[in-house]
């Protein structure tokens, strides 16, 4: 059975104007637009080439507020795919600071807040984290510079924790650890490292968030 992802029509999502890059949640309230106008659509190649439908992706940075460090992970080169599951392969072997994925009809339909529910589900699926945590939306990402970004819309959030966090290799996360701002910038500055566009776009705002703690 093909999974279905939460989408919003592009014309509705950007009815008050489009943007490129990152925009603060204080500037625009896209979350309410999404919650009021979403529906679910089967995942697959057709959806991945349909820019008129924006697939909403929760993108959660996990941070340690006491040490002012962020959790980065690297996606595995190879990933297993279950029957009927569409698996995104264009992110493989890249560094990422955002834990997340599609909002699924199977698990989120009927929820009063499918965005928030998907955020928590994705974190619990992709990493081992001890103790409680909350995810707070800080902004949104739009990047039409490539075929991936043109069909996806990122809801960027921060989850604070003082607990140990480990990536789950079974979910395609090859490695993960907390890094200081200096370490993150060394990783991003190394030309041998591939880094997700969304991670590069949102990191300056996550760094600023940590500087005010």
Image (spheres, rainbow, N blue to C red):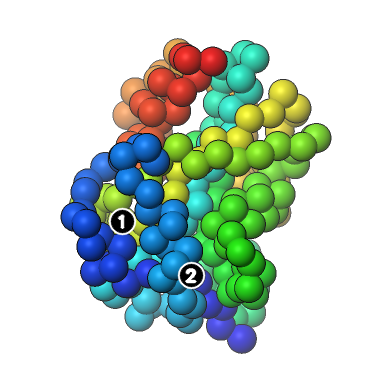
Q: Which residue is drawn at 64% across and 79% down?
A: 83
Kindly report the distance in space between the C-alpha atoms of the residues bearing marks 1 and 2. 16 Å
Eye-nearest disc, 1 or 2: 2
Looking at the image, residue 104 lies above or below residue 57? below
Outermost residue to the bottom: 1
Under tag 2, what secondary structure? strand
Label at residue 149: 1
Location of residue 170 by image quarter: bottom right
Q: Pointer 2: what residue?
A: 6
Task: Point out residue 102 in the picture as x, y percentages from the top left corner.
Answer: 52, 62
Location of residue 45 by image quarter: bottom left
Looking at the image, residue 23 lies above or below residue 143? above
Residue placed most toward the observer, 95 or 70:
70
Label at residue 185: none
Task: Point out residue 70 in the picture as x, y percentages from the top left corner.
Answer: 55, 26
Q: Residue at x 33, y 46 (%)?
A: 28
Looking at the image, residue 159 lies above or below residue 77? above
Q: Can I make out residue 171 in this image?
A: no
Q: Which residue is drawn at 44% across and 28% down?
A: 206
Residue placed most toward the observer, 6 or 190:
6
Residue placed most toward the observer, 209 or 94:
209
In the figure, is residue 25 to the left or right of 150? right
**Which quadrant of the rendered structure holds the N terminus?**
bottom right
Return the disc, 1 or 2, that comes first in the chain's sequence.
2
């Amino acid at each position: 059975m093909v999974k279905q992802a939460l989408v919003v029509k592009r014309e509705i999502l950007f009815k008050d104007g489009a943007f490129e890059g990152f925009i603060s949640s204080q500037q625009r309230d896209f979350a309410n637009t999404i919650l009021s106008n979403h529906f679910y659509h089967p995942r697959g190649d057709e959806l991945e080439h349909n820019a008129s439908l924006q697939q909403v992706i929760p993108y959660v940075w996990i941070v340690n507020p006491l040490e002012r460090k962020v959790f980065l992970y690297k996606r595995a080169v190879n990933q297993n795919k279950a029957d009927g599951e569409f698996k995104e392969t264009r992110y493989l072997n890249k560094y990422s600071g955002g834990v997340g994925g599609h909002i699924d009809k199977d698990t989120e339909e009927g929820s009063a807040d499918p965005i928030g529910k998907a955020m928590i589900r994705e974190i619990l699926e992709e990493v081992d984290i001890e103790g409680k945590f909350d995810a707070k939306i800080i902004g949104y990402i739009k990047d039409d510079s490539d075929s991936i970004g043109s069909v996806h819309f990122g809801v960027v959030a921060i989850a604070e924790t003082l607990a140990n966090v480990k990536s789950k290799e079974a979910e395609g996360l090859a490695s993960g650890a907390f890094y200081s701002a200096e370490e993150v910038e060394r990783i991003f500055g190394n030309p041998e490292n591939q880094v997700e566009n969304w991670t590069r776009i949102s990191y300056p705002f996550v760094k600023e968030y940590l500087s005010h703690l």
